[in-house]
Image (cartoon, grey):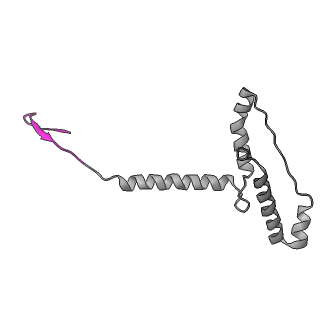
Amino acid sequence: MHLLSESAKQYLGHLWVYKDLTHHYELEESLRETQQKLSHQSLTDEFTQIGNRRFLDKTLSELESDICSNQFPLSVAMIDLDNFKHINDEFGHDVGDNVLKAFSDFLKQQIRHTDV
């Protein structure tokens, strides 16, 4: 910044102002990490760690234009565990949760890394 005398409009010199923005950048990074964490939580089932309905809607929406414009094939599998309510009723929700976790872990092991 150039300094000028008001009365004489005479050049007086330079004024340099420095401010440490480290804390500001650390807060920005913390905010970014928190946003990513919240986004992941909103799209992922907490217990099974697989995508939820919101994730499915978001992913299909993102893939829609690619599929239509490039004519990529797409397969969607809808899986229903028969009589799952019976497992919860007969053995309790803890056992039902373990069945869901084991089944989701099995599915994750069976798909390719490029699959969703």
Q: In x, y percent, where is residue 61?
A: 71, 38
Q: In the rendered structure, which segment of residues is drawn in magenta? A: 1-17
| Residue at horizontal 74 percent and vertical 32 percent from the top | 67
Q: Is residue 111 magenta?
A: no
Residue 41 image offset from top left, x and y in percent: 64, 56
Query: Would you place residue 85 above or below residue 8 in this image?
Result: below
Query: Could you tell whether 31 is left or right of 6 in the image?
Result: right
Q: Is residue 110 visible?
A: yes
Locate residue 58: give its quadrant. top right
Q: Residue at x 88, y 72 (%)?
A: 91
Above or below for 58 versus 65 = below
Image: 48 above or below 55: below
Q: Quadrant of the N terminus?
A: top left
- Residue in front for this viewpoint, 113 or 81: 113
In this rendering, does residue 5 appear at all?
Answer: no
Which residue lies at the image location 55% right of the left edge and 52% below the top edge? 35
Percent across and percent down for residue 43 are 68, 52
**Left or right: 80 as drawn, with respect to 7:** right
User: Magenta includes 13?
Assistant: yes
Is 75 situated left or right of 113 in this image?
right
Q: Residue at x 83, y 45 (%)?
A: 77
Nearest the eye: 69 or 89? 69
Q: How many labels does the image show?
A: 0
Q: Residue 40, image x and y in percent? A: 63, 53
